[in-house]
Amino acid sequence: MSVRLLVLIVLSVVLMVVDARFETLKPLRSQLGLVLTPVYWLTDLPLRMWEGMSEQVASRSELIEENRRLKNEALLLQRRLQKLATLTEQNVRLRELLNSTALLDDHVVIAELIGLDPSPFTQRIIINKGSRDDVFVGQPVLDATGLMGQVVEVMPYTSRVLLITDSVHSVPVQVNRNGLRAIASGTGSDYLELRHVPETSDIKEGDLLVSSGLGQRFPAGYPVARVRSVVHEPGQAFLQVHAVPTAMLNRSRHLLLVFSDAGTPEQRMGAAGLSVEAQVGDHEVEPPSEPLEEQP
């Protein structure tokens, strides 16, 4: 057995030497390589299959992880976009509000809406300015597009505002086109009604109504509403006129408190028909017992 092994070793050495120094065995080596190629391929097949499966598993895991990461990033970006959209809209509204203050001759203070009256029979809002900010009962409240209402209740840090569409609220107005005077009364809905407008009055759909200044509660010239419909009823002495407020009552968040004179809070409250004692310490102010309707 050892002799055979020795002979094979010697033969192998001789073949390697002959192959290295001479070209005699080169064709044979090429033929043997061609014959052994399938053997090489078969012996390497398990390793290649294992590597392929490993790559697929790793690729799938990486794809799952990347997909999860991208989803999280998409959610974060969507949240940021929503925040940016909100801030953009708020910025637009504040710019409109600041631009509107440049058109006013009176001193104004910006307030923010912080609450709504839960009663379905009244239309009131709560703002974040009160007696500490010299807010007084009867003070006009506007937004960037028109008159919203007036303050009816003052507390140290907040106030309650009665909207112009409330059923107990009225404001003297005039048609901006020709100066025709009327009373715009709230209906408890989203529109105003002009009372006691004669049948022969020159008023038509689309007319802008502005505050007339009569009654000395609302300064003159503030946009109040735009006429939506004018109905002529046969045999009736008065027209049925409905108008839509120019102020965005259901959407405005930032408002303007108008200080139309330089009087003290006591003088303002006296002009509003209330006693100074109605506002003491941290107690709420009782709303006026008289109707809020103004008479021209």
Image (cartoon, helix red, strand yellow):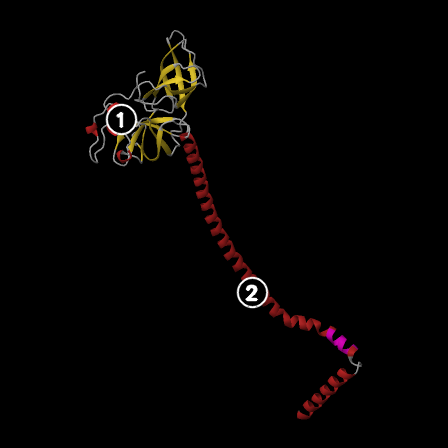
Q: Is 249 displayed left or right of 9 in the figure? A: left
Q: Residues within 10 Å of mark 2 (few under 14, many from 20)?
A: few
Task: Report the span colored magenta.
Answer: 27-33
- Percent from the top left, x then y, of residue 96? 43, 32
In the image, farthest residue toward the right: 24
- For the residues labelled 1 and 2, the Cα–Cα distance comes to 84 Å
Q: Residues within 10 Å of mark 1 (few under 14, many from 20)?
A: many
The quarter of the rendered structure image containing the C terminus is top left
> Which one is nearer the viewer's eye here, 180 or 133?
133
- Percent from the top left, x then y, of residue 215? 31, 19
Residue annotated with mark 2: 54
Residue at 48 percent of width and 48 percent of height = 77
The quarter of the rendered structure image containing the N terminus is bottom right
Local secondary structure at mark 2: helix
Which numbered disc covers residue 119?
none
Which numbered disc covers residue 268?
1
Assess whether residue 6 is covered by the magenta stretch.
Answer: no
Q: Quadrant of residue 291?
A: top left
Q: Amino acid at mark 1?
A: Arg
Local secondary structure at mark 1: helix
Q: Quadrant of residue 284?
A: top left
Q: Is 238 displayed left or right of 50 in the figure? A: left
> Which one is nearer the viewer's eye here, 230 or 171?
171
Q: Is 142 displayed left or right of 281 in the figure? A: right
Q: Amino acid at mark 2?
A: Ser
Residue at 25 percent of width and 26 percent of height = 267
